[in-house]
Amino acid sequence: MKNIIERDTKIKTGGVPSVGLSFIYILVLNNIKPDIFGFGLNENDKTSHYWEIRNVNPSHNLKKEREILNFLESQNKIKIYL
């Protein structure tokens, strides 16, 4: 999935894509425009799951994933709700 995302977006993932980003991209590849809630695009270095603050898994690059999600929204491939 990493290679496909990087090829299509021209953005290096900087690590292993999360399951969430990978699933979103599978939807995009199948011409499904998902509505995205709760991905913390307005957060800084930590990630939350609505009820708790969590550290980011070091195998994922949160900054790059947010960049990819924002790119997908700019291309009208997904809709993000903050």
Image (cartoon, rainbow, N blue to C red):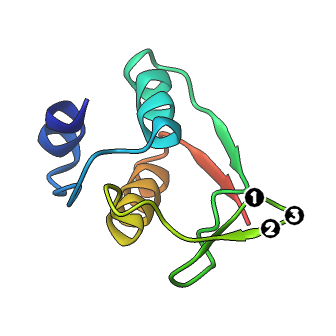
Give above or below for 32 relative to 35: above
Q: Look at 57% across and 31% down and name the residue there.
A: 33
Q: Name the residue under label 3.
A: 51
SS class, disc 3 = loop
Q: Label 1 belongs to which residue? A: 49
Asked if the residues shown at circle 2 and circle 1 are in contact, with their CB atoms under 8 angstroms apart, the answer is yes
Q: Which of 33 and 53 is in front in this view?
A: 53
In this view, the residue in front, 62 or 52, is 52
Q: Tell me where residue 50 sits by quadrant.
A: bottom right
- The CA span between labels 1 and 3 is 6 Å
Nearest to the observer: residue 76 or residue 2: 2
Residue underneath mark 2: 52
Is residue 67 toward the left or the right of residue 2 in the image? Answer: right
Gap between marks 2 and 3, in whole Å?
Answer: 4 Å
Mark 2 neighbour density, 10 Å: few (under 14) some (14–19) many (20 or more): few
**Badge 2 element:** loop
The residue under the point 47% across, 39% down is 77
Whether pointer 2 and pointer 3 mark residues with C-beta atoms closer than 8 Å, the reply is yes
